[in-house]
Each structure stands twice: as C-alpha cells, then as structure tokens.
Amino acid sequence: MRKSSFGIAGLVLVFALVAGVVLGRGNFAPQIAQAQMEAMDHPRTVTVVGEGVVKIKPDIAQLNIGVEVVKPTVKEASAEANEIMDAVLATLTEAGVEEKDIQTSGFSIWVERVYGPDGSFDDEQNRYHVSNSVFATLRDLDSVGATLDAAIEAGANNIYGVTFSLDDPKSIESDARAKAVENAKAKAEELAGLTDATVGAVVSISEVIGQGGGYFGGNFAANQMQYGGGGGAGAGTSVSPGELSLSMQLQITYELK
C-alpha cells in the first residue's frame, strides 16, 4: 500500500511539473513577440558631437572708456566727472563714432571714509569717488589707437579694455555649423565601422549651447592692447586686432544599418 501511494504521488508531481513547463512556454511566446516588435521600433543608433571652427578677421572694436574723479564732496566729484565725460563723448563724436554706437556701461559713487585712532571718522575728511564709463563701437579698426589717445587727452583715466568681434556673425556661424556636420558624419562613420555597421539617416540634430560651442563672447581670441604713453612722434596706443576663432558644436544622432 505504501509503494502504491508513493507511486501515485510521484506521478501527480511529474504531471504538475510538465503542466507548469507547458503553461510557462505558452506565456513566454507573447513576451518574445513583444520584445521583437520593440527591437524593430527602436533601431540601432549612434550619437556624436561634431565641431566646426572658422577663422575670421574682426570688423568692429568695442572700447570701454571710463572717468574717475575723487573730491572732498560728492557734488564736486560728480560735477567734474560729468565735465570730463562730456569732453570724452565730444572727442568720440569727432573721431567718427556714431551716437547709436555709444552707450553708458557704468556709473557709480562711493565714499572713502578716513577713520581716526579711536575708530571714529570725520565727515570733513571723506573722499568721494565718482566713476562714469561708456562703451564705444568703432567700425574703422585703423582708428582704434588714435581714438583711445584722443579720449585719454580729453581726460579719460580708465581704459577697461578693447574687444574685437564681428558686426554680423550669422554667415560665419553658418559656415561653422556646416563644418560641424561634416565632422559629426566622419565620427559616426568611424564608430559604425568598428561595429560592422553603416551610417544611415539623421534621426535628430541639436546645437550645443554653452561651454565649447556657440557665440563669440566665449570663443573669440583675446585682443592685444598697449599704451605707449604721451608725447613725441610714434608714441600712443598700439592695437592689434589679430584673428578671431568661432567654434560651433552640433549633437547628431544617426541610424545604423
């Protein structure tokens, strides 16, 4: 009786295992089909970042010219600063800078307090600083040095820098983008070749904005400016516009075949 009971129980267990496997196979079929469909809906792709660099010569220069005056009273400092700045603006106009190309870039007033040994201060010892500065855009690069000299002669005592750029960079940006596409295609083909694939159609493309690509605020080379002092033939400001470099980056995804 024991052997008979054990045999029946064993048969029941084997039947249950077989049924489970069969049922399990029946459940796997839809999952396999779904995975195959998903693979067809999501083809293989490769994503690369292409870079295009264009070298160009600048055609405009932006001067940042300032005036700072220090006086015992804010009224005196402000009046003298205004007088000098008016002279500087008149000089810029005489140099051929148009009114639309002159813009105030900064204006500030601050007090320099003189403290005594006991930590107190006397208003009569105060020194007031008044600063005024303007951006001037020059479209004749040959006149940059002479314009700086004239502004300094008029009373400007702060030259914050000279920036060279392009008045209309759109065409140059288009050239850089075209080079970026060529660079991206070459990278994609190299990667595809490593996996025995070929490059197909473009799936998506976007421009990389920010670090390493974009606009000439962060991509153009620094300018050179030297001030040689006043008086005598050949003395004055020496400016070298040099060559600028614009870099554009594009992220492109290609289909792989």
Image: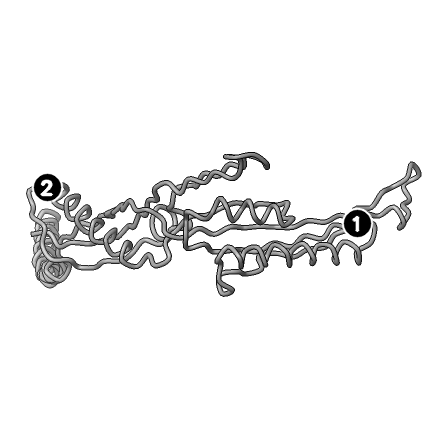
Tell me the element at label 1.
strand
Q: Look at 57% across and 45% down and name the residue there.
A: 159
Dot 1 and dot 2 residues touching (CB under 8 Å): no
List the single residue furthest toward the bottom.
100
Q: Look at 50% across and 55% down and name the residue there.
A: 95
192 to the left or right of 172: left
Q: Where is residue 129 in the image (x, y as percent from the top left)?
A: 74, 50
Q: Look at 29% across and 55% down and name the residue there.
A: 173
Image depth: mark 1 or mark 2 in front: 1
Circle 2 residues within 10 Å: few <14, some 14–19, many ≥20: few
Circle 1 residues within 10 Å: few <14, some 14–19, many ≥20: some
Numbered marks: total: 2
**In this view of the protein, which residue sits in the foreground, 41 or 111?**
111
Residue tagged by mark 2? Answer: 195
Q: In this view, does 10 lie above or below 97?
A: above
Residue tagged by mark 1? Answer: 71
Q: Look at 53% across and 57% down and name the residue there.
A: 94
Distance CA(mark 1)–CA(mark 2): 74 Å
- 1 or 2: tag closer to the N-terminus: 1
What's the amino acid at mark 1? Lys
Q: Where is residue 90 in the image (x, y as percent from the top left)?
A: 59, 58
Q: Where is residue 45 in the image (x, y as percent from the top left)?
A: 16, 52
